[in-house]
Amino acid sequence: MQINHTKKEQLNRSVWSGGTTTQLVIYPKEAIYKNLDFNFRISTATIEVEESTFTSLPNVSRVIMVLDGELTIQHKNQYTKQLKKFDTDIFSGNWKTTSIGKATDFNIMTRGSAKATASGFTLAEKSKKELILNSDVMAIYVSAGEIVIEQSSTQKINASQGDVVLISKEKVSENFVLLAQKTSDIAIAEIYL
């Protein structure tokens, strides 16, 4: 298991037409989002306008999960879906997509054979949750709070609000534990390459 911890201060934040976005992970590291030459990209975004239009991303699969607030996602000629905290939607970057509502979201984009899932949960103070790394890569984003990620008694990582921890699988499957130092909101991206 390879673990890479990126602190909030090290992440790139930029402005888009509806708010701000923060790139958490792009793979490979040399990839450039605008060139669409990534296998996967994970980001968060704030939607600060009541109605927004999603950027068209041909040949990109998207997963979006609400971290805070509520969104109504409308995919023209497809379907409309209401998203509350930790609800997800999986859709094609080719679709004409708009949203209504102000929120903070967690986004995963994949290309080629890469696939992704997203999940989220709140971990109460002093509680723990065991996770199993079955995917090729797992990203753990601390949306709120503070956690300790423990892979063994010797390997511990303290992650605070805004930090992202990327874990890559080396064996068949591996276990680790999340311990909440205080009540924490956690977003998980699982990537299958």
Image (cartoon, grey):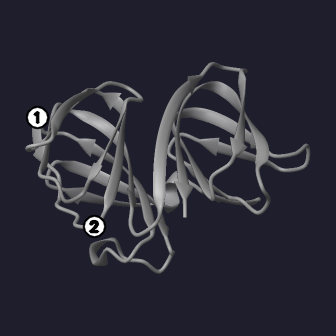
Q: Nearer the viewer, residue 88 or 18?
A: 88
Q: Residue reaching furthest right?
A: 153
Circle 1 residue: 50
- Foreground tag (2 vs 1): 2
| Side of 187 where 3 appears, left or right | right
Q: Position of residue 78 (x, y in %)?
A: 14, 41
Residue 110, located in which quarter of the rendered image? bottom left
Residue 124 sits above or below residue 59 on the image: above
Question: Label 2, label 1: how many angstroms apart (C-alpha)?
Answer: 27 Å
Residue sitting at x 68%, y 49% = 134
Q: Above or below — where is 77 with respect to 15?
A: above
Q: Which residue is mark 2?
A: 59
- Give the residue at x 41% y 72%: 38
- Specify the amino acid type for callout 1: Glu
Looking at the picture, which amino acid does disc 2 mark? Asn
Quadrant housing residue 92: bottom left
Is 110 placed above or below 82 here?
below
| The C terminus: image quadrant | bottom right
The answer to whether 102 appears left or right of 51 in the picture is right
Residue at 73% of width from left, 26% of height from top?
128
Image coordinates for residue 133, horizontal then vertical, percent: 69, 47
Q: Classify 10 Å Cα crowding around label 2: few (below 14), some (14-19), many (20 and above).
A: few
Tell me which numbered mark, 2 or 1, is placed earlier along the sequence.
1
